[in-house]
């Protein structure tokens, strides 16, 4: 069975804007990505993990 990535809502820890990120497929979790906010361009880390069958994302400031 093929597993597809899921869109995850994330909130920037710097500007607090929320946007959608295409997350990894469930088979690729847990994982961590370095990512720049799509609104303010500040760096952050997004941690993806699996909660039952759903990919969940948490953001952390790199500063």
Image (cartoon, helix red, strand yellow):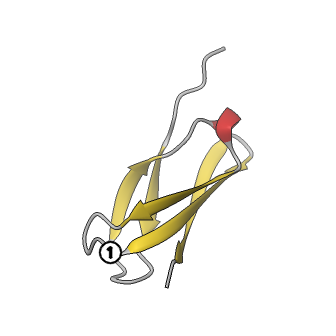
Q: Position of residue 48 (x, y in %)?
A: 62, 54
Residue 57 or residue 32, whichever sits in front: 32
Against 53, residue 20 (above or below) is below
Q: Residue at x 34, y 75 (%)?
A: 42
Disc 1: which residue? 17
Q: Quadrant of residue 13?
A: bottom left
Q: Residue at x 71, y 49 (%)?
A: 30
Locate the N terminus by quadrant. top right
Q: Position of residue 11 (x, y in %)?
A: 42, 71
Assess disc 1: are there few (<14), some (14-19) or many (≥20) residues with their C-alpha within 10 Å of its C-alpha.
Answer: few
Query: How many marks do you count on the picture?
Result: 1
Q: Is residue 61 left or right of residue 29?
A: left
Element type at mark 1: loop
Against 59, residue 13 (above or below) is below
Q: Position of residue 47 (x, y in %)?
A: 61, 60
Q: Residue at x 47, y 71 (%)?
A: 44
Q: Residue at x 25, y 69 (%)?
A: 39
């Amino acid at each position: 069975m093929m597993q597809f990535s899921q869109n995850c809502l994330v909130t920037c820890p710097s500007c607090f804007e929320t946007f959608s990120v295409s997350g990894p497929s469930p088979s690729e979790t847990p994982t961590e990505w370095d990512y720049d906010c799509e609104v303010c361009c500040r760096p952050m880390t997004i941690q993806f993990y699996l909660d039952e069958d759903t990919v969940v994302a948490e953001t952390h400031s790199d500063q």
